[in-house]
Structures are given as C-alpha cells and as structure tokens.
Amino acid sequence: MEFNPLEILKETDGVLTGHFCLTSGLHSDTYFQCAKLYQYPRHVEAFAKELAKKLSGIEFDTIVAPAIGAVIFGYEVAKQAGKRNLFVERKDGEMQLRRGYTLKKGERVVIIEDVITTARTIFETKEALKDFEAEIVGVGCIVDRSEGKTGLNITSIMQMKPVLYEPENCPLCANGIEIIKPGSRVGK
C-alpha cells in the first residue's frame, strides 16, 4: 500500500478545518492535530520510517524533540534511525533540557517537530541546547507550513501552503466564526 500522509492524517482526524489560533498566535482555517495520529502506533511508525529515510543523508547522533507535541514522534524517528532520543520541555515559560539529559560539545542533533509554521518552538529548542554547544545539523517534521520563511533547512514528510491571518486582519474573526485554540502552548 502506498504511503499517503495527508490521507492518513485525514483518516485519523489529524486535519481539522474551522477557525484556529495556532501556537504561533496566527489564525488559520486548517489545523494539524498530530496527537490524533499518535493514537495509532502503526501510522506513527510509518511516518517515522519515512522521515528517518529522508534524514539518512544527514550525519547525526541524537534526536531532540520539543514537548509535548513532538515527544512521541521524536522517539519513533530516533528508533527508526537507530539514534539516541531526548526531549526539551517548558519550565517557567521556556524550553529546557531537563531530567538529567545532557549533550556533549559538538554532538550532532536533529530537532524533530510535528508541525512547523513559524518555527518558534524550533528556535526555542535551539536556545535550550545552546549552553551544551551541540551542533544542530537538521530539523525534521511531519508537516512544514513555513513556506521557507524560517531560514531553516527543514526536512518534512509534507509541505502545505497555509492559510494564515494576523489576528487583527482575520476574516474568520470578522465573520464571527468561533475560534478554537487546540495547541499545547499556554498564552499566545
């Protein structure tokens, strides 16, 4: 059977339509809820195999994923690639490498995320790793909605052109359509 990531996301209710406030604070008519995908280990494994294959040209030692959204996917990509897996998590409003995790100076890291739009969480993850002097050699994700605007070289399973609105210019808001904020970040 051919691997069709968008169809699998739709089948698992991982693609939502409506009026959403994204983690970035931007509004959109489409939301990717990869947590729905994570209910099905066989699908997670298929997505992770696909991304691990795409990352195979990059020499790296460790996967680091931001909590909470990418922890499961980061683990499975690390498993498929035969690499070590860590995660960063928010404490006092900022991403931190905790739980006794450490990185060696020069350790080659790929950051894994589920969905990237503005890459804010990727940049926060990079900041959390800075003191360890690890080398960030790649970024991977399920869905890249950034349109190349992040300045990062992103390896993704899917690229989607997002419909994004600044909150003050959102036609969905102007039409009184109820907004939903399904992401995991508290605040903006």
Image: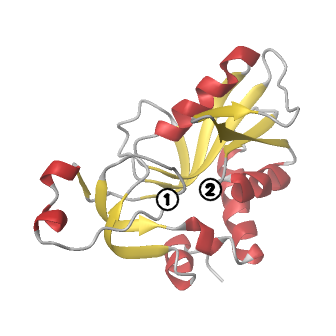
Q: Is residue 30 left or right of residue 3?
A: left
Please tell me which residue lies in front, 87 or 52.
87
Side of 155 where 132 appears, left or right: right
**Given the image, on which type of amino acid does mark 1 rest?**
Gly
Q: Which mark is residue 183?
A: 1
Q: Nearer the viewer, residue 77 or 183?
A: 183
Q: Front-most of 75 and 108?
A: 75
Tell me, yes or no, whether the two marked residues, 2 and 1, touch with CB atoms within 8 Å.
yes
Seen in the picture, residue 109 relative to 47 is either above or below; the reply is: above
Q: Position of residue 27 (x, y in %)?
A: 29, 57
Q: Residues within 10 Å of mark 2 (few under 14, many from 20)?
A: some
Mark 2 residue element: loop
Does dot 1 land on a helix, a strand or a loop?
A: loop
Mark closest to the chain's N terminus, 2 or 1: 2
Left or right placement of residue 160 versus residue 157 in this view: left
Q: Quadrant of residue 43?
A: bottom right
* Residue for point 76% across, 26% down: 108
Residue 134, percent across and down? 74, 20
